[in-house]
Image: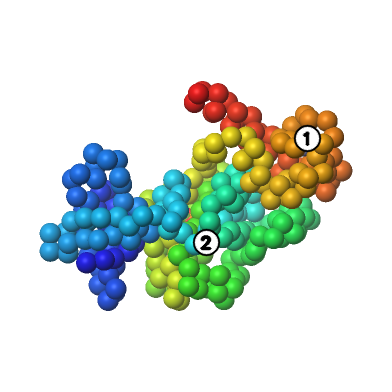
Amino acid sequence: MRGLIIKAISGEYMIIDADDNIHVAKPRGVFRFKEHVPKVGDLVEFDPAKQVIQKIAPRRNELIRPAVANIDKAFLVFSVVEPDLNLNLLDRLLAIIEYMDIEIVIVFTKLDLLTDRTDFDKVNEYYRALGYHTYLSGLNAVPVEALTAEAAGNVSVLAGQSGAGKSTLLNALDPSFKLKTDVISRALGRGKHTTRHVELLRVGDGWIADTPGFGNVDFDFPDLLTLSHSFREFFENADGCKFNRCLHIDEPGCTVREMAASGRILSSRYDNYRLFHRELKDMLKNKY
Ligand SMILES: Nc1nc2c(ncn2[C@@H]2O[C@H](COP(=O)(O)OP(=O)(O)OP(=O)(O)O)[C@@H](O)[C@H]2O)c(=O)[nH]1
Ligand SMILES: [Mg+2]
Ligand SMILES: [Zn+2]
């Protein structure tokens, strides 16, 4: 029988078949030796009587964090306060996902808690101008219709920090989900890792995965040029740089660096790029 893995809990998988029946199964022993671990989003062949997953269909794509496969769209969920807007993590996820065949939507949450919107409006406008769909959400002001429309016909995943409001968003889309949510730790300024498992939930005729929050994720780029290309506006303007394979760090005649200096590229974004460049450089050095 064929089905879609919708939930994974400690080595067991919940699978939904074509008739909407839910099954529980474990992977065949041989998977473990091959380090071939099924993920939520996997299409599998399984034996419902023996409760064994026999085969995983080839993946279209997969994310390491959150751990999901075969994703059409990623909703990057970022609170503007509590926790503070984490543009480093946003730029990181944008870079990682930009290079995969996955659409990106940004949802900014907790707008109701923001007293001065000046800086935020500028940031939002910038990402919008890059071509990303952005949505603003707040207490009793979740853009339910727009997000449901974004989810239609897609398998999507929510990604973002703990406490950003991912589960809260899903509960607003469908109150019957009753997903657990919890206040963030005021002392630490971050969430309490309330969601522990990845789970696909049906929203209209689409699926959205609730996921555990995370604060960081490693790059898996083969080289530094790939990283620079994964910043949309850098890639688009790199033709103006003097050097063909300009990495926009300290090369002379670099258009991207000039644009950052004159404010045409958001300074936080250029600064994050430089941090990522350094990080990836160190990673690649240790690898080879
Ligand atoms: N004021 C306000 N609070 C919100 C908003 N969205 C979420 N919250 C609150 O933020 C806290 C964290 O929300 P969760 O939905 O649990 O966050 P999460 O992203 O699922 O966190 P993890 O499961 O730990 O990854 C809860 O107390 C929510 O009620 C919002 O738009 N405005
Ligand atoms: Mg949650
Ligand atoms: Zn350059």
Residue 11, position in %: x, y?
Answer: 25, 49
Residue 217, position in %: x, y?
Answer: 51, 41
Q: Is residue 34 left or right of residue 74?
A: left
Task: State the residue at coordinates (19%, 50%).
Answer: 28
In this orientation, which residue lies closer to the viewer: 284 or 268? 284
Q: Is residue 54 visible?
A: yes
Colour logic = rainbow
Q: Is residue 105 positioned above or below 188 on the image?
A: below
Residue 99, position in %: x, y?
Answer: 57, 49
10 Å crowding of disc 1: few (<14), some (14-19), many (20+): some
Q: Is residue 66 left or right of residue 269?
A: left
Tag 2: amino acid: Lys
> Which corner quadrant of the image does residue 23 belong to?
bottom left
Q: Quadrant of ligand 3?
A: top right
Task: State the residue at coordinates (78%, 45%).
Answer: 239
Q: Furthest-left residue in view?
A: 49
Badge 1 element = loop
10 Å crowding of disc 2: few (<14), some (14-19), many (20+): many
Q: Which mark is residue 243?
A: 1
The yes-or-no answer for disc 2 within 8 Å of ligand 1 is no
Q: Is residue 283 left or right of residue 12?
A: right
- Of circles 1 and 2, the one toward us is 1
> Which corner quadrant of the image does residue 122 belong to?
bottom right
Q: Which mark is residue 73?
A: 2
Badge 2 element = strand
Q: Is residue 237 positioned above or below 53 on the image?
A: above
The yes-or-no answer for disc 1 within 8 Å of ligand 3 is yes
Residue 158, position in %: x, y?
Answer: 49, 58
In this orientation, which residue lies closer to the viewer: 110 or 68? 68
Total marks placed? 2
Tag 1: amino acid: Phe
Q: Is residue 40 visible?
A: no
